[in-house]
Amino acid sequence: MKRSWFAYPYSLWMVIFTIAPMIFVVYFALTDTSGALSLSNMAAVGQETYLKILWRSLYLALICTVICLLLGYPAAYFLASKDFNKNQTLFVLILLPMWMNFLLRTYAMMSLMENQGIINTLLKAMGLEPVRMIGTEGAVLVGMVYNFLPFMVLPVHTSLKKMDQRVIEAAEDLGANPAQVFRRVTLPLSMPGVISGVTMVFMPAVTTFAISRLLGSGNFMMFGDLIDKQFLELNNWHFGSSLSLIMMALIIISISLLNKADPKGEGSAI
Amino acid sequence: MKKNALVSILAILLACCVVMGCASALADSQKQRTLTVFNWFDYIDEDVIKMFEQETGIKVTYTNFTTNEEMFVKLEKSAGSYDVIFPSDYIIERMIKEDMLEELDMSKIPNAANLIDWCKSPDYDPEGKYSVAYMWGTVGILYDPDQVDGEIDSWGALFDPQYKYGVFMLDSIRDSFGVCLRYLGYSLNDHSEEALDAVKDLLIQQKNDNIVAGYLVDETKDKMVAGEAAMAVMWSGDAMYAIEENENLRYVIPKEGSNIWIDGMCVLKNSQHKDEAMEFINFLCRPDIAAMNQEYISYCSPIQQVVDGYDEEQLNQPALNPSAETMENCEFFHDITEFMELYESRWMEVRA
């Protein structure tokens, strides 16, 4: 029995909130203020100023993804292990920050990292030199990792969890030591989760905008900030759309590269 | 099957339109008087709105913006949704030029007679036909005397490398360029490539010397209260707020001169509620209401009775009551829309 009409409300939703906006973005990106077809806005993206900002976004997003992977994989591995099967506390702790809006969390990070903030007050109380954190690239990076880490842990955890334990037992029976089991069995089988995690961290990281303003004090403009500025401050929707189009293209390219590595989409947790 | 889906989608869309149409017809029939106010974020004592609703029975929808530019974008993109707006001087000038503002009917705004004289005929609206002043103020430096050498009296302090990460700049093109233009001896409204290039070099130098702590707008005042930096370029009202929270801080309008501005109240030409809008403007000009707002947001009120009520401390506060010579040395921004691209490209180079 076909129940395809179940999907109609969602199709409508998609038409209004995904497809229509995309059409607008493409239309604005390829026209100028008079409404005539023009590639001048697309060409303007290539200016040194904007490439510099794009490069910074890609580079920070990449570092953020690597850190999330290095922190998130071991955590997911531990969470999925047998010793941990019954106790859900840590798992809840990892999810807990996601229950609160990311902007609020970022404001909280700001008051932690300010010159007169909580961390520096503690340092001073212990007789140590205060450290300048707020307004640095490092602060932006910490904020990004903090916000996006759960997106790495969850898919990796899922893929480790649904792994057939008998495969690992078999490897052990055949004489593999723990390191070999991990390298030749667990890691390859968890790759779909890793790929999904990398996608889910990299995409929001590369389009970050509020974090860089709050924790970087506006010193490190990222691609998201640049787009935000075109729409809200400079009233240049055409150039803003061109920037968005480039960003979307970059994301689509990176997703398709990743999909090549995970053709069956086994790790997809979205 | 696909055809079916399309038909259903269209049917749902149609149904939505019908429902919304009915809803709005229903609202009209009830004849509730309404008004949509579009004001700066945190720029009114919200009790005033409740009082206005109680006294007049007009239902107010209150919405906010953060910068003039943002407001202008929203007005263009959703024409007809707003009635009363609070633009700054140079935006009023531009809106008059573009014929967006309704001429005010002064017989409906008798309280406008309470304005101090120089605010009655500002040069952006010489006959006061389109706007009534709401608040005015200046741009200056707010500084922490414990973190600087002696007294600050020049914009030059913003570019002194001894203040490592010690200066907050405004993330606002015209203000940031404006202070540099005055420092270099140009007018705030200069748009020659020579002047703007000089400003750009100065700002890039400032950034490369690691003097800038950040480019922010709304967050700066709280950061200054907490002692996050030695000084900040700031609007006088924000400076007043910070000084009230931290008495140690001082505000100065540098000797090179600065920007003086007025935020006015205007009615949009495409407004559907012009009478209500003028009633609202009149209400805000009533001395007791103006005093409530002045006390709440700490900017300078243009209402004579409020100024007469200042105490000694308020009279001596340059953020609230600058001296006559200082005001002589300040200038208004003018509308330079057609040259903004020259500003914007250079500002992006600074910020990238």
Image (spheres, coloured by chain):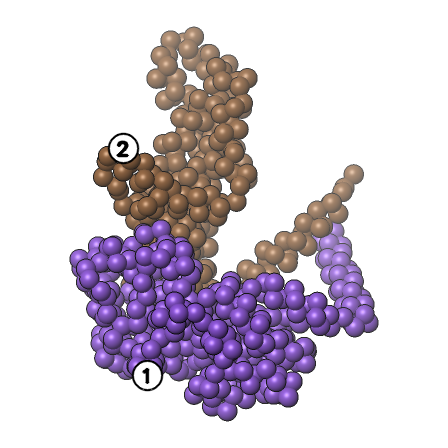
The residue singled out by tag 1 in the image is B328
- Rendering quarter of residue B237: bottom left
Mark 2: secondary structure: loop
Q: Colour of chain B?
A: purple
Q: Are marks 2 and 1 on the same chain?
A: no
Instruction: Provide residue B317's location: percent of width, then percent of height.
Output: 36, 69
Instruction: Give the letter of the chain under mark 1.
Output: B
Neighbor class of circle 2 (other Cα within 10 Å; few <14, some 14-19, many 20+) is few
- Rendering quarter of residue B33: bottom right
Of residues B171 and A82, the one drawn nearer to the viewer in this rendering:
B171
Residue pictured at 76% horizontal, 42% vertical: A3
Residue pictured at 44% horizontal, 24% vertical: A77
Badge number at residue A126 = 2
- Rendering quarter of residue B26: bottom right
Amino acid marked by disc 2: Met
Mark 1: secondary structure: helix
